[in-house]
Every structure is written in C-alpha cells, then in structure tokens.
Image: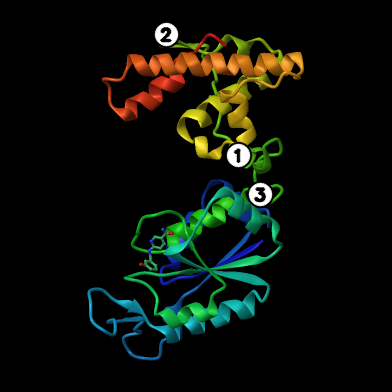
Amino acid sequence: MKFLFVTLFPEQIEQAAGHSIIQRAVNKGLVEISCINPREFTHDVHRTVDDTPFGGGAGMVLKPEPMVAAIRKAKEQLPNARVIAMCPGGRTLKQSIVEEYAHCGQDFIFVCGHYEGFDERIFNWVDEKLSIGDYVLTGGEMPALIVMDAIARFIPGVLGKLVSAEEDSFSTGLLEYPQYTRPVNFEGLEVPEVLRGGNHALIDAWRLQESLKATYFLRPDLLTEEQLRLIEKPLPYKMKKAQRKFWEELRGKIAAAKEALAAVTEQDAGEKDTALLKEDEGNG
Ligand code: 4G3
C-alpha cells in the first residue's frame, strides 16, 4: 500500500517512517512512503506557501497555488489514491473508519496543513477531511502518521505472524482485557489464577468477562443492546447452562466492582475508574 504525504515538513514523515514496525513494513515492500513538498511548487524568491487571511484575523492561511500544484502532482503519482486532508474539523477517526480504509484497496494521499489552516478552495482537490480527535495541533503531520499507522497494521505481514489487527480489542468492539506476564508475583500483586491454569475455555471466558466489565464501566456506549440486556435485565428463561453461568459470573464481578466503587466515593473520579477495574485481581 502506498502513502504519499503532501507536507511542508517531509523530514517529520521520514523520521517517523524510519522506526520499528513501519520501517520493517517499508523494508519488506509492504508499505511505500513518499512526500511532496508544496514549497517546491512556489515561484517567488521567498518560496511563499502562506498568506494573511482575507477579512483579517490572526495567523496565516496556506495559499491555494502551491498546495493544489502539490496535490495534482501527488494524484499523478498515485491515480488510485484517496485524498485526505487532516484537519480538526474533519470526520473523527475511529477503528471502523480505519478498517474501511484498510480494506478499500486504494492508496492514500494525506494533505497536511499548518498555521491556521487551508484556503477553503483547496478542498475541491480533496476527497475527505479527517480529524484524529477534538484538539488542535501545530500541523497535520502527526495526525496523518497516526492514520497511516492504524491502517498499516491491517496489511498482512506488517504485524508479527501470530498477531492480527482484525482480532484487536477495538475490532471486537470491546475494551481490552487485562494482560500479565512474568513474574507471577510482582511486589505483592499476583497474576490471576485462571490465567496460570492452562484451561483455554476458562481463560477465554475470563477474558471476555473482563472486556465486558471494563467496557460496561468505562465505555458503555460501545456495548450492543443485546450485551447490555444480558448484563442488566433478567436472563432469558431458555439459555444454555454454560451461557447462564458466564453471564451470572459477570454480573457478580460487576456487582463487586460497584461495591468497591461505593467504598471509594470520597476519592476523585479518576481514581474510581482504576479502583473499579482492580477489585477482583487475583480471584480469577
Ligand atoms: C487545518 C489536524 C490543519 C486547519 C490538523 C489546523 C489537529 C488535527 C491544521 C487547522 C491539525 C486533528 C493543522 N490539528 N485533530 N493542525 O486531526 O486549523
């Protein structure tokens, strides 16, 4: 997959592409990264890319001529690419958008802005505006790199053999379950018994319960109506025994967590979240 960045600061992109998993993907030929600098498309001695806004106001605006010339060049190089402008006012990125990008079979041109933004007319050469979240940064390079990284993880061979982006917590729609590695006892904090037992059916059930519990407390908006019903409403009369046990156990964990919460009400909300998720450590 090819990623082309239209940017005034190509070194920032090259630097980020020179590390770790993305660098390995480039070396394996799974990902191609390149940059086009709009400054190369200026014709004045000062190589001007920005100017003051019509109507007044603080800051500078990216001029249309060099930006559009750079985007045109980018489209010549990647005619099948989606052209995405990174800006705080764009559609907010989430994992389902990442997956759609990863599976659409197109290359990507990221248009990175600086200063107070783009001349509005530039958007006529752009397919969509994208934001990585509700905050403003000094440039679109880091947001564009974040989008590329999130997409690249879905390209077969980019992650290690046994790891699959499709199985990520966010791709399952739930928050992550807690993970542990050696030592079994770290400063008195023990790895839950169930994870050391090697019973994979039990482990899978425990992990799903923990994911559901974390999601219930921290991001209930991510749960399906069905999941919420199975947590909060009377269980269906007809239900397989193992299933009933699973949901009853989860309800027990949630009730215990709520009690733990009641016990720490004098603490601040940030600490509460932590307390909630810690309550049953070690009692797998
Ligand atoms: C355009 C993207 C670009 C207009 C870009 C600022 C945050 C994001 C810029 C503008 C950016 C984001 C450059 N900051 N949330 N800064 O994805 O006002």
What is the spatial separation of the Cα atoms under label 2 and label 1, in whole angstroms? 33 Å
What is the spatial separation of the Cα atoms under label 3 and label 2, in whole angstroms? 38 Å
Spot occupied by residue 52 in the image (x, y as percentages of width and height)? 27, 82
Query: Which residue lies at the image location 51% right of the left edge and 29% below the top edge?
Result: 216
Query: Which residue lies at the image location 52% right of the left edge and 81% below the top edge?
Result: 124
Q: Quadrant of residue 261?
A: top left
The quadrant of the picture showing ligand 1 is bottom left
- Amino acid type, residue under disc 2 in the picture: Gly
What residue sits right under mark 2 in the picture? Answer: 188
Of circles 3 and 1, the one toward us is 1
Compared to residue 183, the image places residue 55 above or below, namely: below
Specify the label residue 143 is tagged with. Answer: none
Spot occupied by residue 27 in the image (x, y as percentages of width and height)? 64, 54
For the view shown, which residue lies furthest in the bottom direction?
44
Query: Which residue lies at the image location 60% right of the left edge and 14% below the top edge?
Result: 249
Quadrant of the snapshot with the C terminus: top right
What residue sits right under mark 1 in the picture? Answer: 173
Compared to residue 246, the image places residue 51 above or below, namely: below
- Amino acid type, residue under disc 1 in the picture: Gly
Instruction: Please tell me which residue lies in front, 237 or 199.
Output: 237
Compared to residue 134, the image places residue 182 above or below, namely: above
